[in-house]
Amino acid sequence: MKQFAFRISAYTLAFLCAAALFLVTGCGRGRGKALESNYVSAPQANLRDQVAAVYNKVGVVKNGERVEVLDRERRFVKVRTASGVEGWMEQRYLIGQKTYNALQKLAEENRDAPVQASGTTRNDTNIHLEPARDSDHLYQLSTGDKLFIIRRATSEKAQASNVTSNSAGKKGAVSKPTMEDWWLVRDSQGRTGWVLARMVDLDVPLEIAQYAEGQRIQAYFVLNEVRDGDKNVPQYLILLSEPKDGLPFDYNQCRVFTWNVKRHRYETAYRERNLEGVFPVTITHENFEKEGTLPVFILRVRDSNGTSVDRKYKLNTPIVRRVLAEGQNKDKAAASRH
């Protein structure tokens, strides 16, 4: 009888130990289970072993890195990296899967969008999901990064207060909103989003930029090249506007610069003002029978009804002429020479 009781006790003890081990390992798996995926929006962030004033650094995560969220506590999040390192970091350095997916969609939608200009970042700057300072962002560009500009937009700059006192001393006057220009850009890695236009310098060749005459160059294109001695020299289409943000059009002037082979310098072959142009601009080539194959540029311009219409031009160096569709008034397309 005693032997039977001992066996029961031994079996019971073994069962209890196994159950305890299962509960311990099961709880451990529960704590390590990912709640969701997030992405690091800061240039770099430290992982800490605990949420406390005094902690040990257990790892580092970098911009754009994917992490698994394991737990949350106040403004901190416990994460696990792709290499298996676990630690706590501040929630403000992370964005969710929804924002990441939206940025991926934006990149895919504009993957084949025509480039309107290239530029270089003036400072470190964020790529935003929308053209607004308070919109979500993930990737950060470094000073000197190269960008391809796709589109332009404007938005109102957030201000601390819209109530000011005017020069006459009247209180309660509503200030006029400050508008800012934004560029939709794509970087060398294919990452796409919005950046403040003033944070980007367009890579306009100096020999052309010097003729801007105080206007802002919004886009530039190489139309073709001409041979001068032992080198090929590009000829350009430049689009300009007044030097201020918030304009209701992308550009209102265009100029074509051709290369004078005899004088070895650029000259203005064509200029047109008072346009309400919008991006994108199309650059192509087309065969014009006796004239041969010539460079062509197509501007999208709003008419008096606000409708965007295409206007086609051809360059037969050094002459630029409007190419009319059948039925258009030829008087409106006379060539303009500077």
Image (cartoon, rainbow, N blue to C red):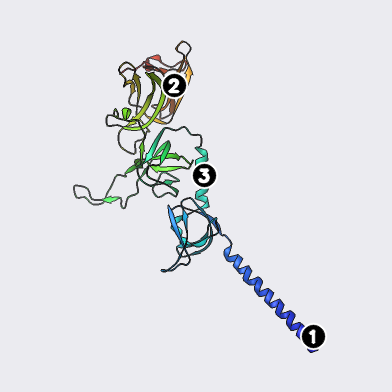
Select label 1 or label 3 by which is in front.
Answer: 1
Q: Which residue type does callout 3 highlight?
A: Gln
Q: Which mark is residue 119?
A: none
Give the vertical position of 282 relative to 111 (above or below).
Answer: above
Q: List x then y, in percent, for residue 200.
A: 36, 40
Give the labeled residue for mark 1: 4
Label 2 sits on a secondary structure element that is: strand
**Image quadrant occupied by the N terminus:** bottom right
Question: Which label's residue is closer to the chain start, 3 or 2?
Answer: 3
Question: Which label's residue is closer to the chain start, 1 or 3?
Answer: 1
Q: For the point 38% across and 17% down, which residue is it?
A: 317
Cβ atoms under marks 1 and 3 closer than 8 Å = no
| Residue at the far left in the pictured view | 168
- Left or right: where 72 falls relative to 314: right
Give the labeled residue for mark 3: 104
- Left or right: where 89 falls relative to 180: right
Q: List x then y, in percent, for residue 105.
A: 52, 43
Give the vertical position of 325 relative to 9 (above or below).
Answer: above
Q: List x then y, in percent, for residue 255.
A: 34, 24
Q: List x then y, in percent, for residue 207.
A: 31, 28
Q: Which mark is residue 296?
A: 2
Q: Residues within 10 Å of mark 1 (few under 14, many from 20)?
A: few
**Image quadrant occupied by the C terminus:** top left
Question: Which label's residue is closer to the chain start, 1 or 2?
Answer: 1
Select label 1 or label 2 by which is in front.
Answer: 1
